[in-house]
Image: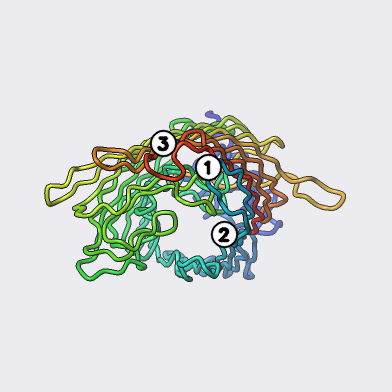
């Protein structure tokens, strides 16, 4: 009898023994076994479907405040994400202002309809003076009756990059690595349709989408398609090997007056690529400026991740090729990052096979008076972006980030990051050759 078969029988026996326990406890047990790789996602679905149904509506806090009907056909979950940051900068010549900000403030609703449909709507409130205004982030409906195939329609992130698809609340560091800035014109949420599927050790997704709703245009709207595949050839007992590839092609909106968002926002016609030093309150240190006459651009990305108990490593390498009209030179830019993390208190970072991403740490012993101290995680990352090619001198940036996170419980987290620019080569710019550093902290509440 195989290890996984024995684990399956053991899990079933535990569920039968706990037949009088609340549905929440059974769901938690199954989810824990699946996250640790003891049972597969297919086995998880079968066991969950075979549980006796409660005669009364249920309530749990696994993913927001969730209420479900007795038969599980209908559910609604209310969630929020609040992140308050403070950053101080060790300037190396050019002044960068210290200060605090409300990094993210979101409210969300999600759940299921008639078992076959799931939905999610999320609204973000931007800090006054940010220039971006409030906006809808997620707004989609997914059809799940064809599992393992799932069809999603609405506004969501195109499927590209492990780092980009990781939830904001679950990211290891306060800000994503430099490659995220290169792909941010792509990974902002866009209206579209996507087909995704997964198995015991793999996931795949492909979709078509239009331009972000925030784009303004006096011409035709841009569009594109994205595809990503992941493989976890080894995933059990807290051990993981992850491989992934992605490809995306996009045609920009004609006569843009607003392109991208956040670090890459621009009000000049053309596609712009730029990057901050992994600190949101810092200015962009490298930028291509608006690339006029851009016909289309395409991304190619590769992913690697591994975990062994509380230790994990992760890295990506990607590049973008830009095709241009009117005799303008085609361009190519590259970027990468590599990081390592270790949970000092022994918790294993959950991994979702069906999405090919890590989730946030859940403390085994939440912080409480007279109780546990939560979970502590340390991490280090090195990343680089090169925006120089041909006549475009956008600059080359390399930095290092060190992080410490305290997970008080599943909802509260305190983070401290140190970011140091190791190399900045941008001829003709005020920051050229400088090596500023950032000291930043965050208080996060998410459920």
Q: CA distance from mark 3 to mark 1?
A: 37 Å
Dot 2 or dot 3, earlier in sequence: 2
Dot 1 or dot 2, earlier in sequence: 2
Contact check, label 3 and label 1, Cβ < 8 Å: no
204 and 59: which is toward the camera = 204
Query: Disc 1 marks which residue?
Result: 351
Looking at the image, is 92 positioned above or below residue 442? Answer: above
Q: Is residue 145 visible?
A: no
Q: Residue at x 37, y 46 (%)?
A: 182
Name the secondary structure under disc 2.
strand
The quarter of the picture where residue 85 lies is bottom right
Query: Disc 3 marks which residue?
Result: 425
Query: Disc 2 marks which residue?
Result: 103
Q: Is residue 175 visible?
A: yes
Looking at the image, is 432 positioned above or below residue 193? Answer: above
80 and 280: which is toward the camera = 280
Task: Measuring from the top left, give residue 66's x and y in whole percent.
Answer: 60, 65
Looking at the image, is 419 positioned above or below residue 191? Answer: above
Name the secondary structure under disc 3.
strand
The quarter of the picture where residue 150 lies is bottom left
- The dot on residue 286 is none
């Amino acid at each position: 009898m195989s290890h996984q078969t024995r684990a399956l029988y053991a899990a079933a026996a535990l569920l039968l023994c706990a037949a009088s326990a609340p549905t929440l406890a059974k769901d938690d047990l199954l989810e824990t076994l699946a996250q640790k790789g003891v049972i597969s996602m297919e086995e998880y679905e079968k066991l969950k479907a075979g549980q006796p149904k409660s005669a009364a509506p249920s309530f749990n806090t696994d993913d927001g405040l969730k209420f479900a009907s007795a038969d599980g056909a209908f559910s609604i979950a209310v969630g929020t994400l609040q992140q308050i940051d403070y950053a101080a900068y060790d300037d190396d010549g050019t002044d960068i202002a210290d200060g605090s900000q409300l990094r993210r403030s979101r409210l969300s609703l999600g759940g299921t309809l008639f078992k076959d449909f799931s939905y999610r709507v999320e609204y973000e409130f931007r800090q006054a003076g940010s220039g971006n205004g409030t906006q809808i982030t997620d707004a989609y409906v997914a059809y799940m009756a064809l599992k393992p195939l799932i069809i999603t329609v609405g506004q969501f992130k195109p499927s590209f990059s492990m780092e980009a698809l990781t939830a904001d609340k679950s990211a290891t560091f306060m800000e994503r690595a430099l490659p995220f800035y290169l792909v941010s014109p792509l990974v902002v949420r866009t209206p579209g349709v996507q087909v995704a599927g997964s198995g015991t050790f793999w996931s795949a997704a492909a979709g078509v989408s239009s331009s972000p709703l925030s784009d303004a245009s006096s011409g035709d709207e841009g569009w594109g398609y994205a595809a990503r595949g992941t493989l976890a050839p080894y995933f059990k007992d807290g051990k993981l090997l992850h491989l992934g590839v992605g490809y995306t092609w996009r045609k920009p909106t004609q006569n843009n007056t607003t392109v991208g968002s956040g670090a890459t926002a621009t009000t000049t016609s053309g596609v712009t690529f730029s990057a901050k030093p992994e600190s949101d309150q810092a200015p962009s240190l490298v930028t291509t400026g608006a690339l006029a006459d851009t016909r289309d651009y395409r991304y190619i990305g590769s992913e690697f991740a591994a975990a062994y108990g509380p230790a994990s490593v992760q890295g990506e390498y990607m590049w973008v090729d830009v095709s241009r009209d009117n005799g303008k030179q085609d361009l190519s830019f590259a970027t990468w990052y590599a990081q390592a993390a270790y949970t000092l208190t022994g918790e294993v970072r959950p991994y979702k096979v069906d999405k090919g991403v890590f989730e946030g740490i859940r403390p085994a012993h939440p912080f409480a008076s007279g109780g546990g101290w939560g979970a502590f995680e340390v991490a280090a990352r090195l990343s680089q972006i090169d925006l120089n090619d041909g006549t475009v001198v956008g600059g080359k940036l390399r930095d290092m980030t060190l992080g410490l996170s305290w997970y008080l419980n599943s909802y509260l987290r305190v983070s401290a990051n140190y970011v140091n620019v190791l190399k900045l080569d941008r001829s003709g710019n005020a920051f050229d050759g400088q090596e500023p550093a950032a000291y930043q902290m965050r208080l996060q509440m998410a459920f």
